[in-house]
């Protein structure tokens, strides 16, 4: 059974606190209407021993955009946002593990949009350093909601209700990921990643107007493809194209660049030449082995190591910053 790791610390209310103490009140909109927006960010150990967080400014920008679309106030500057992440990662980092962190703005006060107050909560989890193995995917009977119902552009937990149902459906069919179709029956995205399709040497991915998140990893993939002289086109993708594609992959901060070995039970080339080359370049670049000018790694400052010894030394009181 899948189990969520329970790291020792969580960043909440402007300070580190123990996992068991990081709780939200049942009366707040963050709980009773699932009012939150979030970002999943990933950090990788670099060859020089530093720990770098991938495209952090882009994640901050998208968090601000999601908050704005749901009218959740968020007044942290980029530096305040980064400091919160540095504080938690600094306390949890282990040299053998990369990390994935979730930075969430929960609505902790307010009612139906009046007097909304948010709190930045950061949770971080250890991740192994393996390149993900190829996966089986399927097409879900659940549908991506439209831009006028629950916009895919808003990265809010609520959007993942359908994703959860699709994953449960997928598990019953032996799939590790599922593709959600949009209201026109075309490919929107996977439950936690964007879809990449290769036909005749060209990489295709649906644009956000088809119901995909404005993906940061997809932009990296496009930049890497351009430097490898691999044509990359954003255009709608029909469902049947997935079944006749030469190669399929998914990409996202957590999925990284994962190759697909079957769609709805139909096998595909596991190590397709195009996505295989892109996957190799992706891991070289994010691990700083062969850097790429598009990729920005924000280094977790070593001063954060001070908090490893005494994570509660800096701010013992649970100071709520809203
Ligand atoms: N779509 C969905 C639904 C996702 O959850 C993710 C992961 N954040 C993505 C696409 C990929 O986005 P990104 O590359 O910015 O992580």
Image (cartoon, grey):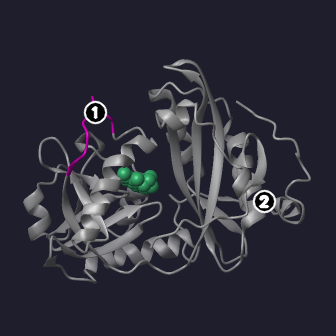
- SS type, badge 2: loop
Residue 216 visible:
no
Label 2 and label 1: CA atoms lie apart by 39 Å
Quarter of the image with the C terminus is top right
Which quadrant of the figure has residue 218?
bottom left
At 65% from the left edge and 36% from the top edge, which residue is drawn?
A: 119
Asked if the stretch drawn in magenta spans residue 255, the answer is: no
Residue 43 position, x and y percent, is 61, 64
Residue range in magenta is 142-151
The disc, 2 or 1, on the residue closer to the chain's N-terminal end is 1
Instruction: Determine whether the beta carbon of the residue marked 1 sits less than 8 angstroms from the nearest atom of ligand 1.
Output: no
Quarter of the image with the N terminus is bottom left
Outermost residue, front side? 26
At 65% from the left edge and 73% from the top edge, which residue is drawn?
A: 46
- SS type, badge 1: loop
- Judging depth in this view, the residue of 267 and 47 nearest the camera is 267
- Judging depth in this view, the residue of 263 and 210 nearest the camera is 263
Q: Of helix, strand and loop, which mostly describes the magenta segment?
A: loop
Which quadrant of the figure has residue 229?
bottom left
The numbered dot on residue 301 is 2
Asked if the stretch drawn in magenta spans residue 148, the answer is: yes
Residue 311 position, x and y percent, is 85, 58
Which residue matches tag 1? Answer: 147
- How packed is label 1: few (under 14 Cα within 10 Å), some, or many (20 or more)? some
Residue 309 position, x and y percent, is 89, 66
């Amino acid at each position: 059974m899948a189990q969520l790791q329970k790291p020792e610390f969580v960043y909440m209310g402007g300070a580190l606190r123990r996992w068991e103490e990081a709780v939200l009140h049942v009366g707040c909109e963050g709980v009773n209407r699932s009012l939150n927006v979030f970002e999943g960010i990933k950090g990788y150990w670099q060859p020089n021993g530093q720990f770098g967080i991938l495209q952090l400014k882009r994640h901050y920008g998208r968090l601000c955009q999601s908050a704005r679309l749901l009218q959740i106030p968020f007044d942290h500057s980029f530096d305040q946002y980064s400091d919160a992440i540095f504080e938690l990662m600094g306390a949890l980092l282990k040299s053998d593990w990369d990390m994935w962190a979730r930075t969430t703005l929960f609505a902790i006060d307010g009612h139906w949009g009046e007097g909304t107050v948010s709190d930045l909560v950061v949770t971080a989890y250890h991740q192994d350093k393996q390149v993900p193995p190829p996966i089986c995917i399927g097409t879900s009977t659940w549908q991506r909601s439209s831009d006028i119902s629950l916009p895919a552009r808003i990265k809010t937990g609520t959007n993942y209700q359908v994703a959860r149902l699709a994953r449960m459906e997928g598990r019953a069919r032996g799939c590790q990921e599922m593709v959600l179709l949009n209201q026109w029956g075309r490919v929107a995205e996977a439950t936690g990643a964007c879809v990449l399709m290769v036909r005749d040497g060209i990489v295709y991915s649906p644009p956000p107007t088809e119901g995909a998140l404005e993906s940061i990893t997809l932009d990296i993939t496009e930049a890497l493809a351009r430097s490898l002289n691999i044509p990359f086109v954003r255009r709608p993708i029909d469902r049947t194209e997935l079944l006749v594609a030469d190669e399929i992959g998914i990409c996202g901060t957590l999925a990284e660049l994962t190759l697909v070995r079957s769609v709805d039970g139909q096998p595909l080339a596991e190590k397709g030449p195009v996505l295989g080359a892109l996957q190799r370049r992706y891991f070289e670049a994010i691990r700083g082995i062969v850097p790429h000018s598009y990729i920005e790694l924000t280094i977790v400052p070593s001063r954060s190591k001070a908090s490893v010894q005494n994570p509660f030394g800096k701010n013992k009181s649970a100071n709520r910053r809203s």
